Image (tube, grey):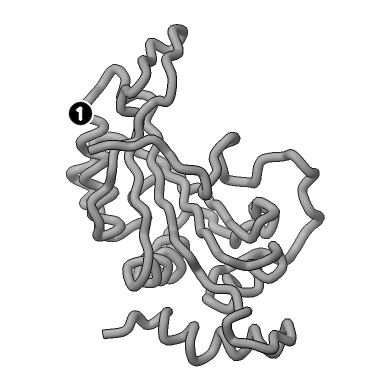
């Protein structure tokens, strides 16, 4: 069965974007490439059980087995050694990507306390958008009674749009609830809700 949001893209979103941006070819219409969901756990250095629960919960949220992210280098002040596990991540493509975005938009975000819409200033200048969630309990797949610690996560939506404006239009048409546009952030400033230094297009060292 074709995911609802994927079918919506084909039948409604792509035609609307072709008209809005005067694309001459349907292949020029921007589309989603992947969604990366990342949980960073600094406390995992001292408590390995946190990594186990994060991996389990991330799998429940996304429907896909996570991979472990590891430190690229040692940092003595933080008792961090190279290759030490520091988090978990999932890269979603295809149907699972659309299914996750549908649940994020229509189920999880409305459950965020005092949610007033997504910022339009969290694009990276290359058509990609990252939002931060403060806890995993906004996803109904998580059983509150089994949660050992509140864990935040970053959700990076990677598109092949040629500009942030085109990516914003794509995500709006897909249903993401953006707030009215405000002034653009200054060049070099990290996007809102995104950990400074994170880049969804860069490879993260990972391992099972």
Q: Which of 37 and 24 is in front in this view?
A: 24
Mark 1 crowd level (few <14, some 14–19, many ≥20, 10 Å Cα) = few
**Residue shown at 30%/35% (left/top)?**
149
**Residue shown at 64%/83% (left/top)?**
17
Q: In this view, does 26 lie above or below 131?
A: below
**Residue shown at 54%/69% (left/top)?**
176
* Residue 2 in picture, x, y percent from top left: 32, 84
Q: How many numbered markers are drawn?
A: 1
* Residue 32 in picture, x, y percent from top left: 50, 69
Q: Nearer the viewer, residue 102 or 160?
A: 160
Q: In which quarter of the image is the C terminus?
A: top left
Q: In this view, does 36 lie above or below 55?
A: below
**In the rendered view, does 87 fall on the left or right side of 203?**
left
Q: Quadrant of the N terminus?
A: bottom left
Give the labeled residue for mark 1.
Answer: 49
**In the rendered view, does 106 fall on the left or right side of 183?**
left
**In the rendered view, does 159 fall on the left or right side of 81?**
right
């Amino acid at each position: 069965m074709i995911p609802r949001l994927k079918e919506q893209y084909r039948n409604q979103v792509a035609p609307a974007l072709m008209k809005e941006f005067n694309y001459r070819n349907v292949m020029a219409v921007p589309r989603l490439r992947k969604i990366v969901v990342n949980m960073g756990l600094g406390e995992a250095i001292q408590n390995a059980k946190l990594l186990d629960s994060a991996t389990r919960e991330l799998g429940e949220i996304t429907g896909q087995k996570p991979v472990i992210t590891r430190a690229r280098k040692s940092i003595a002040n933080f008792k961090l050694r190279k290759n030490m596990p520091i988090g978990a991540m999932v890269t979603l493509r295809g149907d699972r990507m659309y299914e996750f975005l549908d649940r994020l938009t229509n189920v999880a975000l409305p459950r965020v306390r005092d949610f007033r819409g997504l910022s339009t200033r969290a694009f990276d200048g290359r058509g990609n958008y990252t939002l931060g969630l403060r806890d995993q309990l906004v996803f109904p797949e998580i059983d509150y009674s089994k949660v050992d610690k509140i864990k935040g996560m970053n959700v990076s939506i990677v598109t092949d749009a040629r500009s942030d404006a085109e990516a914003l239009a794509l995500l709006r048409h897909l249903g993401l609830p953006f707030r009215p546009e405000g002034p653009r952030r200054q060049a070099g400033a990290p996007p809102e809700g995104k950990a400074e230094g994170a880049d969804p297009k860069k490879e993260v060292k990972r391992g099972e």
